[in-house]
Amino acid sequence: MKQSSRQNKARYLQNLVKDKICKTFNLSNKDVRTSTVGENGEDVKLLTLTAKKVFPYATECKNTEQFIGMYKNFKQSRGHNHREPLLIIKMNRQQPLAVISLEHFFELLEKED
């Protein structure tokens, strides 16, 4: 894959998350921005105090095929019943992580308001 294609793929996911944050919390593009290629820090940067208060997360976006096994496991959790799927993952010497869908994550945030 060309470097420009990789960058476009990463930018797409960053913009998707940024747009969801802005829409969910009625923020403007001046409140939230995505990082440029090679920039250190978070992929989705919260620029205003208001944005940081309503979305208290440090966001890193990875758009890659290396997670194919995780998607298979998430699909398996979806097939158990009609409840919302949740995948818990853990590596040696690492803390457990909870994986939910992006849509469900923003639905949870909307309910908090």
Image (cartoon, grey):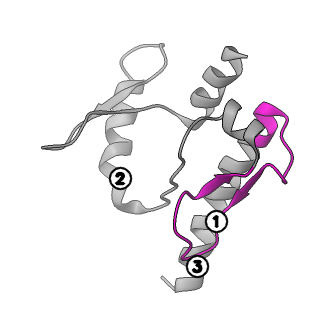
Q: Main secondary structure of the magenta part?
A: loop
Residue type of the residue flagged with mark 3: Ser
Residue 6 screen position, x and y as percent: 53, 75
Cβ atoms at labels 1 and 3 below 8 Å apart = no
Q: How crowded is mark 3: few (under 14 residues within 10 Å), some or many (20 or more)?
A: few
Between marks 2 and 1 in the image, the one whose residue lies nearer the viewer:
1
Residue at the image point whose x is 50% and y is 60% from the top: 63
Q: Which of marks 2 and 1 is nearer the N terminus?
A: 1
Q: In which quarter of the image is the C terminus?
A: top right
Q: State the CA–CA distance, disc 1 to disc 3.
A: 17 Å
Residue 101 part of the magenta segment: no
Between marks 1 and 3 in the image, the one whose residue lies nearer the viewer:
1
The residue singled out by tag 3 in the image is 5
Q: Which of marks 1 and 3 is nearer the N terminus?
A: 3
Residue 28 part of the magenta segment: yes
Residue 19 screen position, x and y as percent: 76, 47
| Residue stretch rendered in magenta on the structure | 22-47
Q: Nearer the viewer, residue 9 or 38?
A: 38
Helix, strand or loop at label 3? It is: helix
Helix, strand or loop at label 2? It is: helix
Residue 105 screen position, x and y as percent: 57, 29
The residue singled out by tag 2 in the image is 68
Q: State the CA–CA distance, disc 2 to disc 3.
A: 19 Å
Residue 80 screen position, x and y as percent: 36, 18
Residue type of the residue flagged with mark 1: Ser
The residue singled out by tag 1 in the image is 35
Image height check: is 91 above or below 75? Answer: below
Helix, strand or loop at label 1? It is: loop
Of all residues, the one furthest to the left in this rendering is 92
Q: Residues within 10 Å of mark 2 (few under 14, many from 20)?
A: few
Q: Nearer the viewer, residue 101 or 27?
A: 27
| Figure quadrant of residue 5 | bottom right
